[in-house]
């Protein structure tokens, strides 16, 4: 039987690790899985914070019942977020504990009906309402759009433990450890960035509002709905989230190319080399056809500079490059330094679309020259590529001086 893991005297982790799902939301690759974190507060009254994706129910029930003596019921299920990776077992839990009251805000209550056809035994809560569990008093704060309209956090004021839903969460299953001091946080911080950039990043301004609320609460422990529990220095993860959602970047350049036969790659290789020669250490090159979008978006979120290179395909941008550009527009990233190049053999198409992308990207700065090559780059073309690389590098370095 799986066992609950103690966080404080009466608060337990009862989540599960999913290493079977290949793609989160059908889109984002999970090379090391993902955890769905749920929590039990075992007081005079028992309360659970969130459920689990339906396929992982047995781990959850085993961990839950490992703490509770036979016959002990669940008084409350607090629903922080209705995305089915957390709400997927609500119906089963209600079936197991028919007297259990489900707690959510006005929007949650509507969604519980729409997703699960449950309308009874529900308590609607508002910002600042207090739920008395005996020793523990918990309160609720709304953080709309981090990640859905109904998202809220639950705060245990007695022990200063924040159940922060998707905020501060990350990909990667929990590999034995569940706390920040038990895990390799270099790996997990990248996975938290990858989760933020792909799942939450579009909602950066709601995230800023959520961060202000979280800072005011001064939690001692942050328990997100995915990834490590932050108990060593919870401010650190809040600071990182703050930085990312302010579109504050690191010194570096991401180079992404779309190439069928290597001619465009030839150009971006020259560009990457000249960026490195200009003294930028963090240069990351992605093949847009092969690398999962989630890694490209995470790297692009992190760094100031971006170079996009694409061949022309049936008069248009190469399809996976078009997907990347559409996705970047949707994420509403701000204030990046961009260089573009493209290739064609007869009608052109790719570079013009990259130019349009640059124009529509708000406050991004397009660095010259934009390089367009017919079939295979000549030595002069490659010199232009090197010039573009140097200019991108200089613009990035200037920003960090
Ligand atoms: C399936 C296919 C469709 C293409 N469509 C166009 C096109 O519509 N217009 C054009 O100018 N070139 C087109 N090209 C030519 C490529 O864009 C051009 O050869 C480019 O330099 C290839 O770059 P790469 O070697 O990086 O793949 C096409 C090539 C292929 C294989
Ligand atoms: Fe979510
Ligand atoms: Fe989630």
Image (cartoon, helix red, strand yellow):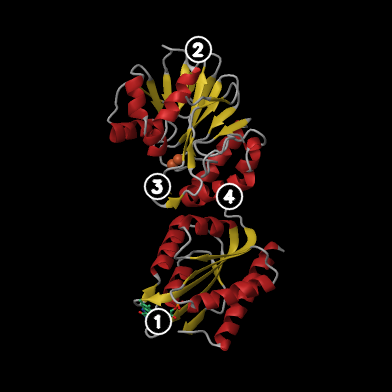
Q: Earlier in the sequence, mark 3 or mark 1?
A: 3
Q: Which residue is mark 3?
A: 25
Q: Earlier in the sequence, mark 2 or mark 1?
A: 2
Task: Give the secondary structure at mark 2.
Answer: loop
**Dividing the image into four equal quarters, which quarter contains ligand 1?**
bottom left
Q: Mark 3 or 1, which is nearer the eye?
A: 3
Residue 65 picture quarter: top left
Q: Mark 2 or 3, which is nearer the eye?
A: 3
Query: In this view, which residue lies farthest toward the right?
Result: 401
Q: Position of residue 140 (x, y in %)?
A: 49, 28
| Ligand 1 within 8 Å, label 1 CB | yes
- The Cα atoms of the two marked residues, 1 and 4, are separated by 38 Å
Q: Mark 2 or 4, which is nearer the eye?
A: 4
Q: Position of residue 163 (x, y in %)?
A: 52, 31
| Ligand 3 within 8 Å, label 2 CB | no
Q: Earlier in the sequence, mark 2 or mark 4?
A: 2
Q: How many residues crowd around disc 4 within 10 Å: few (fewer than 14), some, or many (20 or more)?
A: some
Query: In this view, which residue lies farthest toward the left?
Result: 117
Answer yes or no: do the residues labelled 4 and 3 have beta carbons within 8 Å?
no
Q: Which residue is mark 4?
A: 190
The residue sitting at 56% across, 61% down in the picture is 335
Query: In this view, which residue lies farthest toward the front?
Result: 1
Give whichever of 369, 267 is nearer the camera: 267
Q: Mark 1 or 4, which is nearer the eye?
A: 4
Question: Horizontally, is 375 left or right of 54 in the view?
Answer: right
Q: Which residue is mark 2?
A: 44
Give whichever of 150, 343 is nearer the camera: 343
Q: Which residue is mark 1?
A: 348
Give whichever of 400, 45 is nearer the camera: 45
| Ligand 2 within 8 Å, label 3 CB | no
């Amino acid at each position: 039987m799986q066992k609950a893991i103690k966080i404080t005297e009466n608060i337990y982790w009862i989540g599960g690790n999913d290493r079977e799902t290949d793609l989160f939301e059908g889109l984002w690759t999970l090379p090391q899985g993902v955890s769905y974190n749920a929590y039990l507060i075992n007081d005079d009254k028992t309360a659970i914070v969130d459920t689990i994706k339906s396929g992982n129910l047995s781990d959850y029930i085993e961990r839950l019942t490992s703490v509770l003596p036979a016959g002990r019921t669940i008084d409350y299920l607090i629903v922080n977020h209705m995305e089915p990776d957390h709400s997927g077992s609500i119906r089963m839990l209600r079936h197991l504990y028919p007297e259990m009251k489900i707690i959510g805000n006005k929007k949650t209550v509507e969604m519980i009906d729409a997703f699960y056809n449950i309308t009874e035994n529900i308590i609607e809560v508002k910002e600042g309402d207090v739920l008395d569990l005996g020793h523990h008093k918990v309160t609720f704060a709304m953080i709309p759009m981090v990640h859905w309209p109904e998202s809220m956090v639950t705060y245990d004021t007695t022990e200063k433990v924040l159940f922060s839903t998707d905020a501060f969460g990350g990909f990667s299953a929990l590999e034995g450890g569940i706390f920040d001091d038990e895990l390799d946080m270099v790996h997990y911080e990248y996975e938290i960035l990858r989760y933020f950039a792909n799942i939450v990043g579009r909602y950066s301004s709601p995230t800023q509002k959520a961060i202000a609320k979280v800072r005011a609460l001064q939690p001692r422990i942050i328990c997100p709905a995915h990834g490590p529990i932050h108990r060593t220095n919870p401010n650190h993860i809040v600071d990182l989230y703050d930085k990312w959602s302010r579109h504050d970047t690191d010194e570096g350049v991401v180079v992404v190319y779309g190439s069928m036969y290597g001619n465009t790659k030839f150009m971006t290789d020259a560009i990457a080399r000249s960026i490195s020669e200009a003294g930028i250490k963090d240069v990351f090159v992605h093949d847009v056809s092969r690398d999962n979008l989630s890694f490209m978006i995470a790297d692009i979120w992190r760094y100031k500079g971006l170079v996009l290179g694409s061949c022309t395909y049936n008069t248009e941008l190469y399809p996976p490059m078009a997907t990347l550009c559409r996705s970047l527009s949707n994420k509403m990233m701000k204030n990046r330094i961009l260089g573009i190049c493209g290739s064609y053999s007869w009608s052109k198409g790719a570079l013009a679309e990259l130019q349009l992308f640059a124009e529509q990207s708000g406050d991004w700065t397009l660095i010259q020259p934009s390089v367009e090559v017919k079939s295979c780059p000549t030595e002069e073309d490659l010199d232009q590529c090197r010039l573009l690389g140097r200019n991108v590098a200089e613009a990035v370095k200037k920003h960090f001086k």
